[in-house]
Image (cartoon, grey):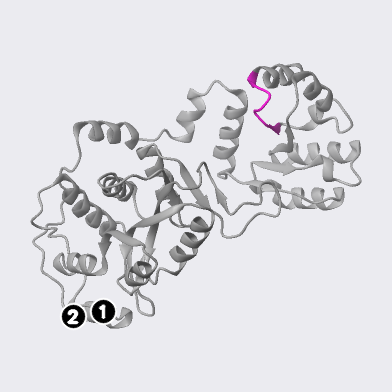
Amino acid sequence: MLALDKDTSLHAAKMRNLLRLMKDRNVFKIDEKEGFLLKSGQELACDCLREMIATMPGHYDGIVGVPYAALPYSAVVSLQLRKPLIIIRKEAKSYGTKKLIEGRYEKGQTVVIIEDVVTTGGSIKDVVKILREDGLIVQDVFCLLDRQQGGAAKLKEDGINLHSLMNMELVLSFLVSVGALNHDQFEQIRTALTLPFETVSQLNIGTELEKAETNTGSERRKAMKRRLSLAERKESTSNKLNKRIIELMLQKKSNLCIAIDYKETEQILKLAETAGPYIIAAKIHADIIENFNKDFTDKLAQLAEKHNFLIFEDRKFADIGNVIDLQLAGTHRIGQWADIVTCHAVQGAESITNAFRKS
């Protein structure tokens, strides 16, 4: 176990701060039935994962996130390390590429996996199987917490090395040392999880955060610390649609957009009437509506005015500007009633903006 109270390195200081923040923000949950639970981590966890991966000997070509809890960590770390992010789906889609593995990679490349919590290692073994079947090399897995319930040994059987930021022994040592757990609670957790140790070390660690970042990191965090309020964002934006959306969010205290994917106009209008007071926008697909007509769009527009929401047509325009212009004025007359539409970017900004300015 890392000598957490004696190590003077920057990484150890970050680890101590991570444990302090996780305790203060109730990340650790002691449950009478479940024993010990771990909720989502913080930005500092990604920072520590990045450092651990960056110091790993050997070469790797991409970062893989285990669905779904580990995906946020994987995305941040891949961005920080400038390595491609590879995502494993739990099941292939029935349309599109129909692939289980999404991302940029080639057969024969080496990837590392990021997981949040490892218990038995079962979900990781499933991911490794999929990756190896597609020709990728997998030898190392990095996780936030190893619950020490046999996962590391089972992964080793498949030639996979588990690297953890922390394990249960370290976490429980910290919690006992700072008075967050008493002896009886420790015993209940140890027994419930059948942990491979009987006692924990007493660490000489205070509860106050310590300086654990470079000047560059400190400046970056200060710049990111304060987010503009919605009211401030409304005043700072020059885009009329953005301003309108923020106004609705402030007025209705909501950010909901409802997807109404019905094929009958009566069903759509009924749901729009019911949900209208609570939503910012209602999204429809005009080209799937079997009895689409002008009377329907007139009634939908009346509901939007009555309940103060935007009409969002999910058309996904993907042609040259002139064709988009014709489509906006075509059979469904989208340009007359839709406040928002979707479009692909493949045709370029110039084609898109010119077409919508005309409409």
Label ID, residue 198: 2
Horizontally, residue 65 falls left or right of residue 101, namely left
Q: Which residue is mark 1?
A: 190
Badges 1 and 2: C-beta atoms under 8 Å apart? yes
Could you tell whether 257 is left or right of 261 in the image? left
Which of these two is toward me, 306 or 283? 283
Number of numbered discs overlaid on the protein picture: 2
Q: Report x, y in % for residue 69.
A: 45, 57
* Residue 213 x, y percent position in the rendering: 20, 39
Toward which corner of the image does residue 342 lie, by quadrant? top right
Residue interval drawn in magenta? 340-349
Asked if residue 26 shows in the view, the reply is no
Residue kind at label 1, given as amino acid type: Arg
Q: Separation of disc 1 and disc 2 at Cα? A: 7 Å
Neighbour tally class for label 2: few under 14, some 14-19, many 20 plus, Cα within 10 Å:
few
Q: Amino acid at mark 2?
A: Glu
Between 295 and 168, the one nearer to me in the picture: 168
Q: Where is residue 189 drawn, in percent x and y? A: 28, 78
* Point 54% across, 54% down: residue: 134
Residue 45 seen in the current view: yes
Q: Quadrant of the N terminus?
A: bottom left
Secondary structure beneath dot 1 equals helix
Q: Residue at x 26, y 61 (%)?
A: 166
Q: Identify the mark at residue 86; answer none if there is no mark.
A: none
**Rendered view: 208 above or below 197:** above
Q: Which is more N-terminal, label 2 or label 1?
A: 1
